[in-house]
Amino acid sequence: MASSQPLATMAGIAVLQSGGNAADAAVATAAALAVVEPGSTGIGGDCFCLFYSASRGVVEAVNGSGRSPLSLTLEMAGGQAGFDPQGPHAVTVPGTVAGWADTVERFGRMPVAEVLAPAIALAEDGFPVTPIISRGWQRQEDLLRMREPAGSDLLADGRAPRAGEVWRNPPIARVMRTVAEGGPDAFYKGWPARAIVEAVQMNGGCMTADDLQAHRSTFEDPISTTYRGHTVYECPPNGQGMTALMALNILEGFDIGSTRPRSAEVLHLTIEAVRLAFADARAYIADPARSPVPVTAMLSKRYAAERRRLISPDAAIEIATAGRIPGGSDTVYLCAVDGEGNACSFINSNYHGFGSGIVPRDCGFSLQNRGAGFVLDPGHPNALEGGKRPYHTIIPAMLTRPDGALMGPFGVMGAWNQPQGHAQAVINLVDRGMDPQGAIDEPRFSIYDDPPNGEIWVEDAIPVGTISALAELGHPVRPASAALRTGVVGQGQIIVRDPDTGVLWGGSDPRGDGCAIGL
């Protein structure tokens, strides 16, 4: 079990010890993270899941993302000039509760009430806040103070909890008990739903009880590509997992294994592949229920070869743009593998810190601002509209070996950083043969603010000569010091299963508070 906070990891371990499987443990950990890391994730956000069944050898996906209010229009939200990415019109229906329940009911073996029990205990008994989580909380103090009706409920005497201070959250425990006793309907049709509607409308939004009652998760076939014989799985659009797969398709045509790690040569190739993938992703990815996405064509090896030809070894592409397709902020990631070899790759998020900062009365959680993922051009496939899922940045991933056996779940958090982190993790695991901890430890780059053509942050563990060489090639690189790297290059978790012995090897990112623990 690996997550970004030790207490959450232990919640998953407790569920495994009680007879749960990887899906049960993943949801228990996600629920615990909603308590101990509320500035990154929570009940007011969304989630996605990939589950590998050892008995059937298949990977399945759950899309636990919510939709915008049905009555929302671009004009109502302020138009192209006035839209507030953390305002009330950026609040989409929180899909987390349904996503948790659907993951457990579809793939798990324990009652939801037992899965939520460790998180409820943490909320009621309290826990010491870690330094990294405290610093993130402090950055959101002003937002929470200004939000009615209950933003101050997530502050201690008007401020963020200090490192080492014990934080208790009885209101979120009450919400979780309501879900444990009554299931998702108790959340989407009961008193929490009424509190959500009141809070959004009090701040000028248009969400209604009907929007919450209509919410459903969707069960989907994952998308995938092969990379040097291994299969990499991602959730399909509206998520951006396709970005990682497209980048890997491009990179497969280069002999990455023969390049020197941390060299300008390999980083240049990887950056260019990621930029080209992002150019297509941001042009085409949207809610497929509203705008068809040409997934098969975008993931074709033939199209990857066309895009690969645009990469020069001598200079960066000046402006990466979308091709002609043939035929057409804060998060937590966690993963679990159980003794039977089932694996769950799970991600949960509020988006920007505490999301919108809107806290429903007596609920103890903030509402996400996933509507910030919409495009404000009405002609774009991902244009802001009512009743629609936005482009989503959070993506879990799964890797299998050439014979179809599980290699392991993995993920790297951090908005636009996520598909970039996925591609770099696969290179480390497959091309470099690194163990999970080494693959996570390896320094990363991130086109953090505006991919594909924004500044490229490079961790300062990468040699100065490499950074200088990338700049000479035309890349707008900036060093990401230790103080910045957690936010810029994200945090990741990996678990790899040995196919011969069944031994599990976990890696947890040293950039955060997390840990990997096994039984």
Image (tube, helix red, strand yellow):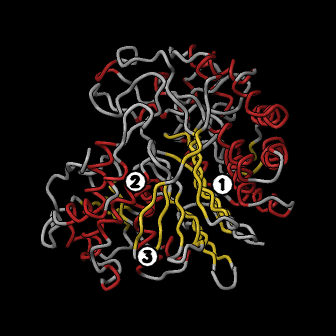
Q: Residue sitting at 55 percent across and 46 percent down? A: 220
Amino acid at pointer 2: Met
Percent across and percent down for residue 271 are 28, 64
Q: Where is 473 relative to 199, above or below?
A: below
In this view, the mark in front (1 or 2): 2
Pointer 1 or 3: first along the chain: 1
Percent across and percent down for residue 98 are 67, 37
- Horizontal side of 400 relative to 445 (left or right) equals right
Amino acid at pointer 1: Thr
Q: Residue sitting at 71 percent across and 46 percent down? A: 31
Q: 61 and 352: which one is in front?
A: 61
What residue would you read off at disc 3?
A: 229
Give me the disc on residue 513.
Answer: none
Give the distance between the C-alpha atoms of the residues marked 2 and 3, in whole angstroms: 18 Å
Image quadrant in which the C terminus is located: bottom right
Give me the disc on residue 242.
Answer: 2
Packing grade of label 2 (10 A; few <14, some 14-19, many >=20) is many
Q: Where is 95 relative to 69, above or below?
A: below
Q: Where is 380 relative to 300, above or below?
A: above
Percent across and percent down for residue 483 are 45, 59
Give the distance between the C-alpha atoms of the residues marked 1 and 3, in whole angstroms: 41 Å
Percent across and percent down for residue 104 are 73, 48
Give me the disc on residue 130.
Answer: 1
